[in-house]
Amino acid sequence: MSVPDTVHGEQEEAVAEAVDQFVDEMASHARAPRIDAFVRRFPAIQHVLRDVLPAIQLMHCPDTPGTAAVTADTLGVSGTLGDFRILKELGRGGMGVVYEAEQISLGRRVALKTLPMASAINPVRLNRFRNEAQAAAQLHHPNIVPVYAVGTERGVWYYAMQIIDGPTLAEVVEAIRTGPSTPEQHLSPTLASTDETFKTVTGIETPGHIRGAALLCQQAARALEHAHNMDIVHRDIKPGNLMIDGHGKLFVTDFGLARFRNDNGLTLSGDVVGTLAYMSPEQARGENTVVDHRSDVYSLGATLYELTTLSRPFEEENRAAMLSRIIEGKLTPPRQVNSALPVDVETIILKSMSLEPGHRYSTVAQLADDLTRFLEDQPILARRPTVVDRCQRWCRKHRSLVALGVVTALLMCVALSVSTIAIATEQARTEAALRQVSKRETSLRFALARQDQLRVEAQANLRQSEENFQKARDVLDFFVASVDEDLGGHDSLRMVRTRLLETSLDYYRDFSEQAQDKPRLQSQLVKSRYHVARILSEIGTSPETEDAIELALRAQEELTLANPHDWRLSRDLWSMYLQLGSFSGTESIRLILEPEVQDELRLSQDQVCTCYEIANGLLGATGGGDDITRTRHEFRERMDNALSAIASALTGLQDERLAQIELQVRGSRVWKSARVTRELGLSTEQRRAIDGIDRETRRAVWGSYSKGRTRQIRLHYTKANEQILALLNEQQAARWAIMIGEEFPAARRLRMRPDPFRFSHSPRAPQNRTRTRSSF
Amino acid sequence: MDGKPQDSFRTLQAIGKCKTSPEAFDELFKRHRHTVKLAISLRMSNSLRARFDESDVVQETYAEAYRRFDDYVKRNPMPFHLWLRKTALERLLMLRRKHVGAEQRSIAREHRLPDASTAQLAREFVGREPTPSGIVDAAERAEQVRAAIAKLSGADQEVLLMRNYEGLKYEEIASLLDIEVAAARKRYGRALVRLQQFLIDGGMSGSQL
């Protein structure tokens, strides 16, 4: 009971007085005074008040039922409420009572939902609720329960809507869950006329069940799409808010009520935990400002999860545990619950339920489209969570168990990348940036050291080894990706980057070797080979590069041919062709997708879109070649089509400039191209001299490379270029100047990164990352 | 503001009626029933709750007050509601002595903060929409506040309860504790300052809210 000496007598009275004043204000205002502001009025005793007032607030919570004259409960069963005559009670929930009622003036039956009074205390919130509910009442969509009226009568807020004869999906799920042997008894009356829906259910393993679930969610998604277009977010999508009528048609209900729920039903624990299960992480974190339509995407994903597996994505006894699981995204993969779930559906669910809103479907329409694709047996567009996602998740999951070093390194990496970018953009050549980078190098080494450890562990047993292998690979991928993302584009950092990539190269080679004789790791092998090739071509021309590229292409081709039905593989293959392959024209397609180039050409928004579409078309599903020559042939054909499509999308001037940029970007390789030879009219001697310079340069580059003097490599190329330019006669030089046009500032960056890492880190994940880069 | 607390006019009227009609006491008691019930429920320990219901104690208070009502009217030591409250707490103390034993001398060891208030609290606290996590936090905080209050001495607890839960005025507290009004205010302030100390000790400092 130690009381500081300074606080005595007068001060005690001052505290008492201030607290009294606070209590008065609390009583006389609808909203509690803000402690921060209040405390400032009493500077002398600020520190005491700051600690005590929250407790005072807690003690003064109005816990007085009966302040509201009329509550929903006192309405009774046979009363009237404004224009509505109550017929019978349909149900009670956390939000109030639902009655079947008759709208007297129109003589129609409605469902009348009364809202609890406690929420009506705050006029501001009430107003917001009214606005939202009224906006929701404007929604007209076949899959949205029409709202007839929102209003207040005798202090009771009500919400009148069309009465739907049918169960909610929550009831349906419950019925299937409790009586799996005879689901038809529960469901057939309501779903009699739908072949597709749950009627055919005999167990959740059947395709009929999955398709039914997909079909229902697709309807819900379409309804939400409509609402989102009107800027209305539901915020409380869950099976309990989705109803099916006798025709198997789905209705989304309770639009505009979510805010109401927030402060109320939450005290009814059982109900709340149920509601929480579908809540998006941003809602669970209470970040109301960032809750947008993608929150609905999440909740719909969670609903699909439950419909297809009959269990909730998160099952926890208490709220706190539930919330933290949601926030951490600790999801049991749905296929672990229902092994019969198709991979595509799982992918759709996982994408919808991504922790980061940015990783979910960006619109609910896209979710609906993917569901449609699944229902029509077409490949879906969603990709599995990317390596980085998995890596991050994995690190999170094993925080305590694993590699404190790796995690620290990852965090360091993230932290550093921010500072590195900031510094690099401002003063790219400063020592500071380089110092930062050498720290980063240390963190990479950390990670690599950890991988060594993982690989040692991997010897233990085969299965474990495969898992560890995957983990180690993921960590490496993550690092390469971040090294790549963060350090690319800054001249002064490029050499450091190269050095880091070289280091990882060895590891990828190791992985390739390890994966070689393990059939289950084939795709890993391909990826590793790809990385080897990519890194080599990044570092510069070397005798190895061509071989590595060929090896990587082969590996991907073989994998694709072995799995002719996996369209993703062929897509990856196309991407690799585009990025590594030596097909003529790949360069211009690659360039046209670069933001810098697009800016330089002043492409219109439409043109940009067209270009992305063309590129995407190029990567679309293969017609199914059965040998490598045919695959490559097909690709070449598509290339040609894409090139002419791009040419016709651009104006003459743009096309010309693109050609100029292409020449600039190709560096000294350009001199050996047929076009340059032809246009400049290079003489035989000149060509021979160029060959000589080229040979010389390659040797010099390889020498520098093998001695680890990567810094010199660029010098060799620059020198070669100068030498060749000196060979040209005046006429040719003039012609050349016209051909390459004005200097394109970004050319050097684009040259040094023949592959702009659009794969970012893995050939299986061409999407994601920033928008401009991602569309392919 | 200072001075003796007074009964309201209507209470005085009701007391007056009791002289002529026996049913009037019923009416009078009903008017103050919630005061009695709140005072009891705030101070009833769990061990006592295991044997009695709050309304049992209210009933006993009624009987006791009825028995001593004539004496009260004659002496009129304090306003009726305070006298009723005092009677109730005496009954409670008796019951506790009889059934639980003397080990629990402090009156308010286990008073409750109403659970339903946590949602409310989250809203008031955070100053925006209550959120599930906010409510979880609020529940935790309620627990911390509870713990801090429990650490206070009996006298400090009592004054906090009277001010913050029962909403008694300083004048009323002063007359109940038989001290000066200014002293009552000071005592309340002291209790708050001590509470602050225990809140900080319990890890609930205002800066994190």
Image: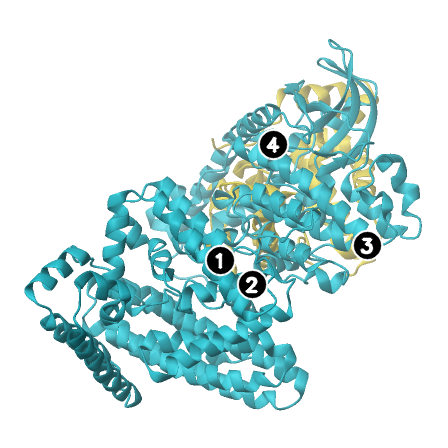
Chain colours: A cyan, B yellow
| Residue ID for mark 2 | A570
Instruction: Point out the residue furthest to the top here.
Output: A105
> Given this view, does label 3 or label 2 mark the residue nearer the observer?
2
Do the residues indicated by labels 2 and 4 lie within the same chain of the protein? yes
Evaluate if marks 1 and 3 touch, with contact meaning CB atoms under 8 Å apart.
no
Task: Report the mark closest to the observer, 1 or 2.
Answer: 2
Identify the residue position indicated by label 3 in the image: A204
Q: Rounded to the nearest whole Å, what is the CA distance between mark 4 and mark 1? A: 34 Å
Q: Which residue is mark 1?
A: A767
Mark 4 / mark 1, whichever is N-terminal: 4
| Mark 1 surroundings: few (<14), some (14-19) or many (≥20) residues within 10 A | many
Q: In the structure shown, which secondary structural element does the residue marked by tag 1 occupy?
A: loop
Which dot, 4 or 3, sits closer to the camera?
3
* Residue denoted by label 4: A256
Let me know if marks 1 and 3 both belong to one chain: yes
User: In the figure, B125 relative to A734: above or below?
Assistant: above
Q: Amino acid at mark 1?
A: Gln
Is B71 left or right of A724, judged from the image as shown?
right
Report, in whole angstroms, how far the alpha carbon at label 3 lies from the one at label 2. Answer: 32 Å
Residue B76 in the image: state x and y as whole percent.
66, 31
Q: Quick one: B29 or A556, which is closer to the camera?
A: A556
